[in-house]
C-alpha cells in the first residue's frame, strides 16, 4: 500500500494497523539493541580469543562511527523517499554483516564487518524513531516512546545474560549469529506492515555535505583513537587527522549554508529546545554510553567475575531504564510536562556515576548493581523525553532530519566517549600496573613475561595464561609472585576505571546544567504536515489488540 504525499502515516492507518506496525518496529529495534548489549559482555573474551587488546575499543567505535556517519543523510533521504525502503535495506545489511562478524578469522576482519553492521544499524535506528513520529503526535508520542525504550531496555536486560551464556558455552561467535533469525523476522514484519509513503517533492540531495561530515567525524575519531602511547597528541599523524577533521567541519558548515536542501539545516539550531535537547543527548552519550562498555572489563578483571556473572551484574541498569521509561512516557503523555522529569533524570545519572567512584577491587559486586540501577532510572527519565522534545521543536517536514540529528549527537557522544575512554583505559592500566607491581616481583620475573600482565585480558586467555603461569611458578617463590602480579592487575584496573568515572561524572554535570535551561513547550497534538486539508483519520486504538495463540 502506498500513502498519498499530502497525508501523514498516522492519518491513514487503522488502529489495528498501527499496533501491527509498532510491533514490527519494536522487533527491528530489538535486533539492533540486543547486539550491542551482548557484545559489551563478550568483548573481553573476544579479544582473548583473537588477540590485539589495543584494538578492543575499535570493536565498539567502528560500529558507532559508521552508524553515526550514515544517520544525517538517511534522515534527509527518508523524509523525501519514505522510511520503508531504508528500514528494509538497513535490516538486510545488518543481518549480512552479523554473519560476517561471526565468521571473522581475526580482529581486523571483525572490525571491518562491525563497520558494515554499523551502517545497517544506523539506518534502522534512525528510521524507526522517525516512523514513530509519522504515526503519533508529540502529545501522545511519549507513551509510545516508552514502549520503544522498554524494548531497548528489555534487549539490554536479556543481552548481557544471553551474551555471557553463549560466550561461556557455544562460543562468542554465536553472539553475532543470533542476529540472523531475529533480523529475518524483523524484515518480514516491516515488509508486511509498513506502507510506502514519499514526500512527492523533488529535492537536490546534499551528498557533498554528507561527505564532508563523514570526513570530519572519521578523522576526529581516528585522531582520538590513535593518540595513545603509540603516537601521542603531538605526533604527525595525530595532528594531520585533527587538521583533516577541522577542514572537513569547515567545508561542511560552508556547504550547509549554501545548499538549498542541507542534510542538517543550521536554522534549526536557532530553536532553543532543539539546540538544548541535542546538547543534552551529546553530553549524556559522552558520560554514560562512553564508559559503560568498559564496565564488564572491570568486573571480569578486578572482581574476577565470569562473562555470565558480569552480564547479570550490569542487567539492573536496563531494568531501571525500562521502568523509568514506561512510567515517564505515561506521565509525559498525560501532563505534557517534561522539564522536571529531565532534570531529575540527569541528577540521578550524576549521582550514580559519583557513587561508582567508591568501587574498589574488594567491593562486593552488588554495589555496582545498585549504582547502575540508579543510572538506568536516570537514563530512562531523560533520553526518551529528549526524542519527543526535539521532534516537537520542528515542523513535520523536518521530522526525519530532527530525529536523525538527535541520533547523530547521541552517537557522536557515545563514539567520542568510547574512543577516548578506550585510550585512557589502556594507557592508565599499563601505567598503574607498573606502579602497583612489587619490586621483588619485578626483579624475579622475566621482563617479557611480566609485560604480558599489562594486558588486562590475559587471565581470560586460558592457554596463554597457563603458559605465563608456568614461567612465573618456575621462579623462586613463583606462587607469591603470581599472586602479586594478579593483584597488581586488579588494582590497576580499579585505578584506570576510576579515571573514566571521573570524566563521565563531569559530562553528566554539564547535562544537569543544560536540563535546567530547558523551557516547557506545549506538545503538538497533530501528525500531519501543515498546509493541505486534513484527511479523515481512523479511530485511535484504545488498547493493544488481544493476543491469541
Image (cartoon, rainbow, N blue to C red):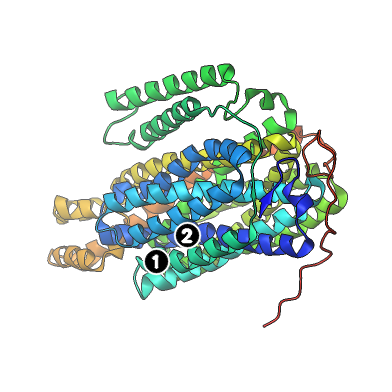
Q: Residue at x 61, y 44 (%)?
A: 82
**Residue 380 locus on image (x, y percent):** 67, 54
Residue 289 appears anywhere in the view: yes
- Give neighbour class at mark 1: few <14, some 14-19, many 20+ (Cα, 10 Å): many
Distance from Cα at disc 2 to Cα at disc 1? 10 Å
Mark 2 lies on a secondary structure that is helix
**304 sits to left or right of 28:** left
Q: Quadrant of residue 1?
A: bottom right
- Determine which residue is flagged by label 2: 35
Q: Residue at x 64, y 41 (%)?
A: 403
540 and 351: which is toward the camera: 540
Q: Residue at x 74, y 43 (%)?
A: 343
**537 sits to left or right of 8:** right
Sequence-wise, the earlier of marks 2 and 1 is 2
**151 sits to left or right of 219:** right
Quarter placement of the C terminus: bottom right
**Residue 113 locus on image (x, y percent):** 35, 51
**442 sits to left or right of 433:** left
- Determine which residue is flagged by label 1: 177
Mark toward the viewer: 2 or 1: 1
Amino acid at each position: 500500500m502506498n500513502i498519498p504525499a499530502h497525508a501523514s502515516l498516522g492519518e491513514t492507518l487503522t488502529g489495528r494497523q498501527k499496533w501491527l506496525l509498532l510491533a514490527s518496529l519494536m522487533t527491528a529495534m530489538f535486533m539492533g539493541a540486543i547486539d550491542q548489549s551482548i557484545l559489551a559482555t563478550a568483548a573481553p573474551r573476544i579479544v582473548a580469543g583473537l588477540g590485539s587488546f589495543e584494538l578492543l575499543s575499535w570493536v565498539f567505535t567502528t560500529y558507532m562511527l559508521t552508524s553515526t556517519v550514515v544517520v544525517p543523510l538517511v534522515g534527509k533521504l527518508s523524509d523525501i523517499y519514505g522510511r520503508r525502503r531504508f528500514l528494509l535495506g538497513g535490516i538486510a545489511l545488518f543481518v549480512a554483516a552479523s554473519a560476517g562478524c561471526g565468521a571473522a578469522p581475526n580482529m581486523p576482519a571483525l572490525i571491518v564487518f562491525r563497520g558494515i553492521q554499523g551502517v545497517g544499524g544506523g539506518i534502522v535506528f534512525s528510521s524507526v524513531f522517525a516512523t514513530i513520529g509519522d504515526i503519533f503526535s508529540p502529545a501522545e508520542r511519549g507513551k509510545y516512546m516508552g514502549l520503544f525504550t522498554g524494548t531497548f531496555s528489555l534487549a539490554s536486560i536479556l543481552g548481557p545474560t544471553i551474551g555471557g551464556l553463549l560466550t561461556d558455552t557455544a562460543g562468542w561467535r554465536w553472539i553475532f549469529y543470533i542476529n540472523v533469525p531475529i533480523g529475518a523476522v524483523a524484515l518480514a514484519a516491516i515488509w508486511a506492515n509498513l506502507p510506502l509513503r514519499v514526500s512527492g517533492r523533488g529535492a537536490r540531495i546534499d551528498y557533498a555535505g554528507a561527505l564532508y561530515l563523514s570526513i570530519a567525524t572519521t578523522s576526529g575519531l581516528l585522531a582520538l583513537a590513535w593518540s595513545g602511547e603509540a603516537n601521542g597528541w603531538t605526533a604527525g599523524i595525530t595532528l594531520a587527522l585533527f587538521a583533516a577533521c577541522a577542514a572537513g567541519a569547515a567545508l561542511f558548515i560552508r556547504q550547509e549554508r549554501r545548499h538549498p536542501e542541507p542534510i542538517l539545516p543550521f536554522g534549526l539550531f536557532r530553536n532553543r529546545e532543539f539546540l538544548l535537547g541535542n546538547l543534552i543527548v551529546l553530553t549524556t552519550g559522552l558520560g554514560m554510553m562512553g564508559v559503560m562498555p568498559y564496565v564488564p572489563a572491570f568486573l571480569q578483571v578486578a572482581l574476577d567475575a565470569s562473562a555470565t556473572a558480569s552480564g547479570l551484574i550490569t542487567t539492573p541498569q536496563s531494568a531501571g531504564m525500562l521502568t523509568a521509561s514506561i512510567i515517564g512516557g505515561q506521565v509525559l503523555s498525560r501532563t505534557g510536562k517534561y522539564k522536571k522529569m529531565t532534570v531529575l533524570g540527569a541528577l540521578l545519572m550524576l549521582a550514580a556515576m559519583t557513587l561508582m567512584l567508591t568501587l574498589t577491587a574488594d567491593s562486593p559486586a552488588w554495589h555496582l548493581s545498585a549504582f547502575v540501577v540508579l543510572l538506568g532510572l536516570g537514563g530512562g527519565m531523560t533520553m526518551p523525553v529528549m526524542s519527543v522534545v526535539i521532534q516537537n521543536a520542528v515542523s513535520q517536514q523536518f521530522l526525519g532530519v530532527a530525529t536523525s540529528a538527535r541520533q547523530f549527537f547521541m552517537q557522536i557522544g557515545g563514539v567520542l566517549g568510547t574512543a577516548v575512554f578506550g585510550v585512557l583505559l589502556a594507557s592508565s592500566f599499563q601505567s598503574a600496573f607498573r606502579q602497583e607491581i612489587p619490586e621483588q616481583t619485578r626483579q624475579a620475573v622475566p621482563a617479557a613475561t611480566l609485560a604480558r600482565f599489562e594486558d588486562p585480558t590475559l587471565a581470560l586467555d586460558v592457554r596463554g595464561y597457563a603458559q605465563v603461569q608456568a614461567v612465573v611458578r618456575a621462579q623462586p617463590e613463583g606462587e607469591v609472585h603470581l599472586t602479586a602480579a594478579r593483584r597488581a592487575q586488579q588494582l590497576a584496573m580499579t585505578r584506570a576505571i576510576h579515571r573514566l568515572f571521573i570524566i563521565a561524572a563531569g559530562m553528566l554535570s554539564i547535562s544537569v546544567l543544560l536540563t535546567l535551561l530547558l523551557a516547557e513547550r506545549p506538545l503538538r497534538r497533530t501528525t500531519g504536515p501543515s498546509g493541505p486539508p486534513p484527511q479523515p483519520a481512523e479511530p485511535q486504538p484504545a488498547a493493544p489488540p488481544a493476543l491469541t495463540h
